[in-house]
Image (tube, helix red, strand yellow):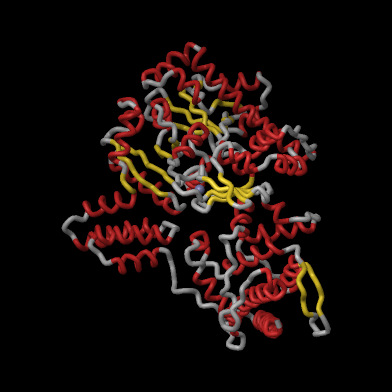
Amino acid sequence: MIDRQTIDRILAAVPIEDLVGDYVRLTKRGSNYIGLCPFHSEKTPSFNVSPSRGIYKCFGCGKGGNAVSFLMEIEQLNFIDAIKRLAKRAGIQIEEREETEAERQQRTEHESLMLLLEWAENYYQKSLTDSTEGKVAGLGYLTERGVTAETIAKFGLGYSPAGGHAMSQAALQAGYSASFLQRVGLVTERNGELYDRFRERVMFPIRSVSGRPIGFGGRALRTDGKLAKYINSPEGEIYHKSETLFGLSLAKRAIAQQDRCFLVEGYLDVIQLHQRGLENVVASSGTSLTTEQTRLIGRFTKNVVLLYDGDSAGIKAAERGADLLLAEGINVSIVLLPEGQDPDDFAKAHTLAEIQDFVEDNRKDFIHFKAANRLKAGKGDPAQLAKLAQDVVKSIALIPDGITRALYIQEAARQFSLSEELLTAEVSKQRGQKPLIARPKNPDTPSAEAPTDAAAEGEAGSPEVEPKAKNPFYVQERELASMLLRYGTENIQIAEDDGSGVQSVRLADYMAAEFAVDGITFTDPLLRRLYDGYQQQLAEGAPDPQQALLSGLDPELTSLCIDLTTDRYTLSKRWFQGGKVVDLSHDDLSLNAQQVVLTFKWDILSQELASKREELKNPELTSQEVDERMHQIQDLSQVLCRLSELTKRI
Ligand SMILES: [Zn+2]
């Protein structure tokens, strides 16, 4: 464990512009630097570095963070390794904090399980290369498939001996306990006896993103009807198959550099393509793709190419995976190999240049591919065609970005000769979009309507807000968070309740008190984490909580914090369209803070009131429950009334 102080010292000692300057040519622009973004391809620079705040932010692709996140991203390092690298650069000795007993025990156990898996990888490797059985059966098979010794070493391939006890006995002799062997899924127990799970199989280590073995896939060498061709380690404390991609630790760098990831089905597909020099390729570990896996890919690139066998089973599998990827906002294209050839065969038969040419010539945008595929299927049958168009609509509807969806709708309308309006309506239906959510309105309080509109519209031209537009409070919460980050430590003037005078209070404290008195908080989980994080920093005496969050250890928060405090994020001016339009700038901080906070409260509580009223309509409520609701409604109405008064007074 590296303590917080050390991390702060390291961050302070490495000027962000120096670090970034090693990778990007930076030009001074005012107090900041600007350059071409290393994370996406661009011709005009939109990559900003701010030395005073110790952060970078790309206005093209949205990536942003501090020195640690920059190094993690560009070098594909984990957090600890990035910190160590920075410390070395700054010439700072890392002091490790002493662990608590519970932490130590947990880490020790986890580490022991990891060490056991490393031992097993080693054991299987030795069985492959050093034992007669392994050489004949395992090595024989791999050689026949054209896998070179270099590739075997690179992927750590191995062999599990026949019999059923060889590995477990060796492990026990090496000092590993039977219970640990069970916990990592290397053995099963029958009638008090341990059996090796993997027997007479070629072993493929499955690795974490950082490259440590966390499980195994084993391929049978005997063809026996009863024998599964592949078996994998079972789910457990260490191995979570839905969150793991085979080959990712070796592919991640190439994926990030080329901004593209090939997705194939099998272990050998990955291995053969790698051997040919195509390194940005992963497989979904012998299961169909999961949402967690698509997110994992999304951390490295937003472009995925499915590389599948051109037979109908291959196409079906590709389509299932594609929909999950589309839903994560990933651009999906597909390359179908000549029928009957999987990537493994294809790679063996061609050179890297041939593979690359084939990919470029045959790569089709997935939705275009699907549409063409359906058009062919429904040729000459209009009724059938309408049904098949629906199928395409389903995939389009999954895409989170509205503009991309619109483009695909346009294209699909042309392909199917259907009207764009019709397809747009279908897509909206699939997305479950209703007309803009009508929020409860109170005719006495006009001030509440403006934020309603602002929330429902989202912010035009600000795509990151769009997916959340369903939460009616999202825009307001973003603005509250932005205000807190910028001005939280400044004092504002609040009129005393009885009108007797004015008191001076820190903006962050004012917000906290106002929220606490009615028990409300942010509804968006990430913004709530940001809010709580800020208040906690403040409570712990951080002089500049914003800076603390920026240099913090939670990359999601750092990134959000940057978004909300850079000049591109301007506070909305639409808060009080009904009455006065308020420019939410620093000049009127006292006034603005109160209006923003009180309006937010009013909106949240109005919704609560509406839902209580709705509950009253339920005929099954007992009379006691009805009473309860009536009381709550009365209370809420009173609070809302007072809030209206207050807003009028400001
Ligand atoms: Zn960028």
Q: Number of marks in the image? A: 0
> In this picture, is 76 found above or below 132?
below
Residue at 74% x, 44% y is 8
Q: Is residue 296 visible?
A: no
Residue at 41% x, 21% y is 147
Q: Quadrant of residue 100?
A: top right
**In this picture, residue 240 sits left or right of residue 412:** right
Nearer-the-camera pick, 494 or 645: 494
> In this picture, is 9 found above or below 588?
above
Residue at 51% x, 72% y is 456
Q: Is residue 455 visible?
A: yes
Percent of width and height locating residue 138: 44, 19
Residue at 67% x, 74% y is 592
Percent of width and height locating residue 76: 56, 37
| The N terminus, quarter of image | top right
Nearer-the-camera pick, 620 or 512: 512
Nearer-the-camera pick, 149 or 403: 403
**In this picture, residue 435 sits left or right of residue 172:** left
